[in-house]
Image (cartoon, grey):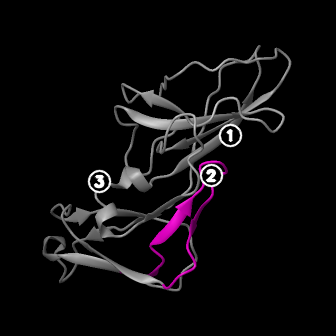
């Protein structure tokens, strides 16, 4: 399972939701699976194939939301400054995948795709520029609210006015800094 945009690896106790589909019906809905060691090996309530020949579709998303056994519905969120901290970015780092399996091929290996956009800025010392003196930076023209659909994996910005995202620099290291933000996929005419 690939790493998340918010970090380089799964974190201890990260949770995903898994739903199965066969002939338009869901036997298992929003089953909560956890990687207790943060190693990408997820465990949860066992799911069983009812028919040896039937192909079952499994969908999975991250981060888990709602209650096991109940479809979570569309998730609304925002990507404003308070969400851009290292502790909060995992809450907006939506991942999704869909795979099929059968009773004689029961192992499902999800290969999650990132559904959000990640922007990484590089600040470097230069002639007349000292990275340590940068206090904040801004992005103009971004829509900062959006939705994520755990059933389809679609993440999209809402149709609303664009805003300016201003962030304080608290991770600048002497000589260079590479802060990142996560936003909903969108086309913008804004500038950083």
The residue where tag 1 is placed is 98
CA separation, marks 3 and 1? 28 Å
Tag 2 secondary structure: loop
The residue where tag 2 is placed is 153
Quarter the C terminus occupies: bottom left
Within-10-Å neighbours for mark 1: few <14, some 14–19, many 20+: many
Q: Tags 1 and 2 in contact by the CB under 8 Å rule?
A: yes
Position of 175 relative to 2 (above/below): below
Within-10-Å neighbours for mark 3: few <14, some 14–19, many 20+: few
Q: How many labels does the image show?
A: 3
Q: What are the residue bounds of the magenta stretch?
A: 139-161
Whichever of labels 1 and 2 marks the residue nearer the N terminus, that label is 1
Mark 3, mark 2: which one is toward the viewer? 2
Within-10-Å neighbours for mark 2: few <14, some 14–19, many 20+: many
Position of 189 relative to 105 (above/below): below
Residue 27 at x, y = what percent?
A: 70, 29
Residue 38 at x, y = what percent?
A: 38, 30
Q: Which residue is located at x 63 percent, y 57 percent?
A: 154
Whichever of labels 3 and 1 marks the residue nearer the N terminus, that label is 3
Position of 38 relative to 104 (above/below): below
**Does the magenta portion include 157?**
yes
The residue where tag 3 is placed is 86
CA separation, marks 1 and 2? 9 Å
Viewer-closest of 44 and 180:
44
**Does the magenta portion include 47?**
no
Tag 3 secondary structure: loop
């Amino acid at each position: 399972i690939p790493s998340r945009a918010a970090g380089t690896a799964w974190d201890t106790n990260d949770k995903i939701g898994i739903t199965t589909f066969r002939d338009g019906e869901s036997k298992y809905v929003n089953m909560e699976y956890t990687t207790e060691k943060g190693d990408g090996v997820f465990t949860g309530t066992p799911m069983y194939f009812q028919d040896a020949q039937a192909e079952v579709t499994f969908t999975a998303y991250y981060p888990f939301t709602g209650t096991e056994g109940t479809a979570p519905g569309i998730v609304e969120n925002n990507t404003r400054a308070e969400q851009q901290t290292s502790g909060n970015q995992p809450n907006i780092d939506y991942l999704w995948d869909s795979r099929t399996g059968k009773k004689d091929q029961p192992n499902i290996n999800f290969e999650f795709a990132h559904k959000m956009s990640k922007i990484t800025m590089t600040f470097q010392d230069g002639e007349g520029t000292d990275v340590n003196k940068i206090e904040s930076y801004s992005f103009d023209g971004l829509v900062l609210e959006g939705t994520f659909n755990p059933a389809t994996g679609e993440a999209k910005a809402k149709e609303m006015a664009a805003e300016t995202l201003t962030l304080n620099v608290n991770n600048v290291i002497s000589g260079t800094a590479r802060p990142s933000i996560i936003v909903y996929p969108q086309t913008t005419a804004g500038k950083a």
